[in-house]
Amino acid sequence: MNARLVLIALALVLLPATAHCQAGDTGTIRIMTWNIKMLPRILHYIHHKPVERARILPRCIIAESADIVLLQEVFDDRCYRILKRKLKKTYPYMLGPVNKQAGTIFSGGAMILSKTPLKKLGQIRFSSCSGNDCWAHKGALLAATTIHGHKIQVMNTHLQAGGVPRIHIDQFTQMADMLQRHTEQDVPQILGGDYNTFRTDTVLYPAMVDILKAEDGPISGDMHYTSDDVVCDMSENYCKVLLHPEQDIIDYLLYRANGHPYRDVYRHIMRYTTPWDLDHQDLSDHMTLIMEVKF
């Protein structure tokens, strides 16, 4: 068999597989959410070195090849500029940080990054808070985009850390009101972010999915927690002797169908590690949650 015939034979073998992969991709949307702990540099006593990590994080984000990226705790302005510069080629469309006010250092820290154009639909600032959370302008950001021909809405948020349950209920309700104002028939809404709500919480977790009218789902793979005191060296309780170390899910990608069911959904958790300090290799105190939705 001459060289030309060999090339033709190879093409016939490879073409169906390539076409199949491309067809599958057009029906799948991939979204990731990550609290990256970019707290202001002035908090140097917590040794979180946000600038050093901001230079490393984009490689991990780009490697995941998500269509939409939701980031929380983008509080430091210099880190924001580094992230924007390193990510803008892959994610040219960015919204946030939420509730950023000109001339101030405060914001809600939540951003939406996308490979496809974003239309900002709305944002809220939570009306209730407690403790240190009141320094941040926490809230939620809602945007619309079209990916592979599918129109979706995406919300990113970061809720109260700790505090009394009433505050979480108030924040769930504010988000639900914003979602309802922008609900469109057959346009699903994907709700992501750091909800600071344990999946094992028998009060707040059911309230969250009920008030938001959204669906959660199982986690696949070897990682089972987005907050883990046992393995994550960025956790403030790492290596401490605790009766009950925190190992739970507090970050979510929820699905609100609005009459548009999916064919399949897959969620998994990733842990990103690179030595960036003598004592640390985890790039944040949260793991990353990734969801793939197939229509």
Image (cartoon, rainbow, N blue to C red):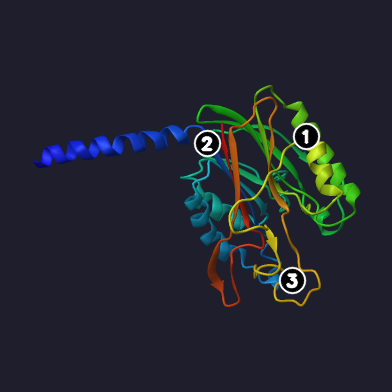
Q: Which mark is residue 109?
A: none
Q: Is residue 14 left or right of residue 37?
A: left
Residue drawn where x is 90% and y is 53% of the image: 164
Q: Considering only vertical position in the picture, is 273 above or below 239?
A: above
Residue drawn where x is 78% and y is 40% of the image: 209
Q: Position of residue 277 (x, y in %)?
A: 57, 74
Residue most extreme to the front: 1
Q: Considering only vertical position in the picture, is 7 above or below 277?
A: above
Residue 138 can be seen, yes or no: yes
Gap in angstroms between the C-alphas marked 3 and 2: 37 Å
Q: Give, as a three-letter code, the residue at label 3.
A: Asn
* Residue receiving disc 3: 237
Residue 182 lies in quadrant: top right
Q: Which mark is residue 28?
A: 2
Give the mark nearer the N terminus: 1 vs 2. 2
Q: Secondary structure at mark 1?
A: loop
* Residue receiving disc 1: 213
